[in-house]
Each structure stands twice: as structure tokens, then as C-alpha cells.
């Protein structure tokens, strides 16, 4: 009986996720789901990316958090519409939550919707939110063993952003070794090496994302 209930939950979630994706696509919007461990740098990456992307594109953010709105408040200073979702302890967003958030936006006036998921490498892997692509932010401070330990989310990622590269020497981490560990699990994902706090390192990622937005317009 428990397995049947879980199956039914996932069927319902995926149906809503597909509906979300149809809404995004119908309106010419690229939707990305950004996932990482807590503290890997998702919000900083989003903050510094949208400061450049907003010069050309219309962007909104769906911000997932357990209890607070601190990250949403940071992003709102970038003059983009932000909807906060508090999961009240839940370890991931689901498609129904995202569907409710979508209703708060004027979709005809958007080019990109960024969904910042709750910090977790396990739970978000199971839930399709209706995104077009999954972006995994992987901080080198987590070590080089996480691709093997959390293989599901690494395999699902369309883009893997290796963050905090400026700390590689301090952390005694080889970026080459780390990237090889990623490739063992996911040989096809787009990989960017960045320091989210240093805008000059984000140029490749921002240019690439801009090109992806253009494909949906």
C-alpha cells in the first residue's frame, strides 16, 4: 500500500510538472531548476548572473527555502519579480508548489524563470517541476567524491557548475580530478568552472544561458 501511494504521488507531480512546462514553452520562456547542497552558492550565482542577464532579458525567480525569505529578499533587490515558497521543513520543491508560483507572474512578459530549489542533493532529484533543464551547482569545498555518492542528481543534470574555484588550492582539490569524477557519472552535461562571487568568471555561463534563452523566444 505504501508503494502504491508513493507511485500515485509521483504520477500526480509529473502531470503537474508537464503542465508547468507547457505553460513555459507556450509563452516562450526558458525555465531552469537550480539544485545544490546548502551553501554551495546557488543564490550568489543567481544574483550575479541576473545582474547581467537583466540587461537584455526579462527574468523572474521562484525561490525555495525551508522557513525564511532571506534569499528572496536578496534577489528582489535586483529588480526582478520573486515568489517565495517556504516548504516548512520539506526537503524539496514539487510541481504543485511551482504551479502556484507561476500564477503570480505575467508569463507573457518573461523570457527566463529561475527556480532555486531547496539545498539538498537527494530529494529534488525525484521531482519534475516543469523545468526545461536542471542546473547543478557543485562547490569544490564539498570534495571530489560527491558525484559518485550522489550519482542520481549528477546524472540528471544538464549543466554542472563547479563553483568556488578560487579555493581549490586551499582545499587541496584538483579541478581536473574533480571534473573527471563528474564525467564518470555524467559524460554529456555542460560544465562551467566559476567563482560565483567574481563576475568575470561567469561570462561563459552567462553567454551560454543567453543563447539558450534565445532558442525559446
Image (tube, helix red, strand yellow):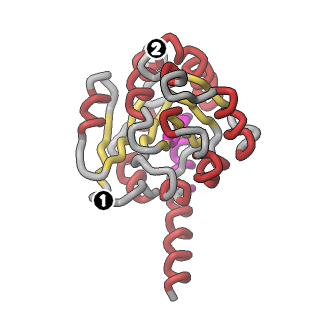
Q: Is residue 186 above or below residue 48?
A: below
Position of residue 182 in the picture relative to residue 130 (left or right):
right
Mark 2: which secondary structure?
Answer: helix
Can residue 107 be seen at all in this image of the molecule? Answer: yes
User: Could you say where residue 65 lies in the image, as x and y percent from the top left?
Assistant: 32, 47
Q: Which residue is mark 2?
A: 199
Q: Which residue is mark 1?
A: 89
Q: In the image, which disc is placed on residue 26?
A: none
Q: Residues within 10 Å of mark 2 (few under 14, many from 20)?
A: some
Position of residue 184 in the picture relative to residue 67 (left or right):
right
Q: Nearer the viewer, residue 164 or 53?
A: 164
Residue occupying image coordinates x 35% and y 42%: 63
Mark 1: which secondary structure?
Answer: loop
Occupied quadrant, residue 50: top left
- Does the segment drawn in magenta span residue 198? no
User: Could you say where residue 158 lies in the image, as x and y percent from the top left?
Assistant: 65, 40
* Quadrant the C terminus occupies: top right
Q: Is residue 66 above or below residue 47?
A: below
Q: Nearer the viewer, residue 208 or 102?
A: 208
Q: Is residue 69 above or below residue 5?
A: above
User: Could you say where residue 111 lies in the image, as x and y percent from the top left?
Assistant: 50, 29
Furthest residue toward bottom: 1
Q: Residues within 10 Å of mark 1 (few under 14, many from 20)?
A: few
In the image, the segment drawn in magenta is: 17-34
Q: Earlier in the sequence, mark 1 or mark 2?
A: 1
Amino acid at each position: 500500500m505504501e508503494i502504491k501511494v508513493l507511485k500515485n504521488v509521483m504520477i500526480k507531480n509529473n502531470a503537474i510538472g508537464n503542465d508547468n512546462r507547457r505553460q513555459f514553452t507556450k509563452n516562450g520562456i526558458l525555465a531552469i531548476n537550480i539544485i545544490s547542497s546548502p551553501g554551495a552558492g546557488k543564490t550568489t550565482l543567481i544574483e550575479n548572473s541576473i545582474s547581467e542577464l537583466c540587461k537584455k532579458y526579462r527574468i523572474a525567480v521562484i525561490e525555495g527555502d525551508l522557513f525564511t525569505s532571506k534569499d528572496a529578499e536578496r534577489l528582489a533587490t535586483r529588480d526582478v519579480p520573486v515568489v517565495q515558497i517556504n516548504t516548512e521543513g520539506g526537503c524539496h520543491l514539487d510541481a504543485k508548489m511551482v504551479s502556484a508560483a507561476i500564477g503570480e507572474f505575467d508569463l507573457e512578459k518573461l523570457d527566463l524563470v529561475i527556480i532555486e530549489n531547496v539545498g539538498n542533493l537527494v530529494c529534488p532529484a525525484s521531482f519534475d517541476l516543469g523545468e526545461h533543464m536542471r542546473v547543478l551547482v557543485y562547490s569544490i569545498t564539498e570534495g571530489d567524491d560527491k558525484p559518485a555518492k550522489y550519482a542520481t542528481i549528477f546524472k540528471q543534470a544538464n549543466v554542472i557548475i563547479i563553483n568556488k574555484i578560487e579555493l581549490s588550492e586551499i582545499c587541496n582539490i584538483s579541478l581536473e580530478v574533480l571534473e573527471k569524477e563528474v564525467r564518470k557519472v555524467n559524460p554529456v552535461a555542460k560544465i562551467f568552472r566559476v567563482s560565483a562571487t567574481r563576475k568575470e568568471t561567469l561570462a561563459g555561463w552567462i553567454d551560454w544561458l543567453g543563447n539558450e534563452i534565445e532558442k525559446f523566444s
